[in-house]
Image (cartoon, rainbow, N blue to C red):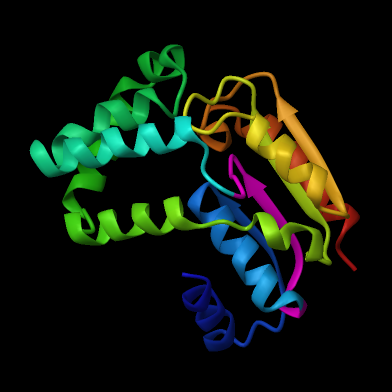
Amino acid sequence: MADEALGILDATGTASCHFVGHALGGLVGVELARQQPRRLRSLTVVNGWAKADAHTRRCFEVRLALLQHVGPEAMSAPSRSSSIRPAWLAEHAARMEQEDAHALAGFQGANNLMRRVEALLRFDATPHLGALRLPVLLMSTRDDVLVPFTQSEQMATAIKDVTLHVAPSGGHGMNVTEPEAFNTVLLDFLGRHTS
């Protein structure tokens, strides 16, 4: 997936960029920073991890079991309820129904999704974090029930040029549920690292 991201940078003639990735996208960014450090001016990892912990693994195992035994339709509610605060979901029920329908209409296929989950569960950047030589912003929330905020705290101890932001709330989808607060932190970080 990092190779695919690099291919996009090459195809668009982008010499370097500020890479922002959420969860799996953050893992892609970490790998891209490891492989091609000159291509990234900064890296932001939102609700990510260096290596999936036991809790996150169980959450993905449940999702895969639902996919394999019930189908993609059954994954939506558990995925949302482990990603976004229930009160926010209740307030935005119509939007979520539309997004679920859109996701199902463009479903990537069970095999592709299983391969992506297997890849992210195999991923282990722990040995490489100390070698990252770029500004890194780690963002997480205390109420993320999919990826505990302690994952970001653990990553922060190994990265030299790191900014850690742990928000009090926002769930795994903090960029959706708390966009103003999310954007303020992100834009501040990018502003400090834009030449």
Q: Position of residue 83 (x, y in %)?
A: 44, 29
Q: Position of residue 33 (x, y in %)?
A: 69, 69
Residue in the image at 46% along x and 30% along y: 55
Which quarter of the figure has residue 91? top left
The mark tally for this picture is 0
Residue in the image at 45% along x and 25% along y: 84
In the rendered structure, the answer to whether residue 63 lies left or right of residue 4 reads left
Q: Quadrant of the C terminus?
A: bottom right
Magenta-colored span? 38-50
Image position of 193 with respect to 174: above or below: below
Is residue 42 found inside the magenta-colored segment of the image? Answer: yes
Work out whether residue 188 can be spotted: no
Q: Position of residue 25 (x, y in %)?
A: 52, 56
Which quarter of the figure has residue 114? bottom left
Which quarter of the figure has residue 68? top left
Q: Nearer the viewer, residue 27 or 173?
A: 27
Residue in the image at 65% along x and 82% along y: 14
Q: Position of residue 191 (x, y in %)?
A: 85, 54
Residue in the image at 60% along x and 28% along y: 178
Work out whether residue 168 can be spotted: yes
Is residue 188 found inside the magenta-colored segment of the image? Answer: no
Image position of 123 with respect to 68: above or below: below
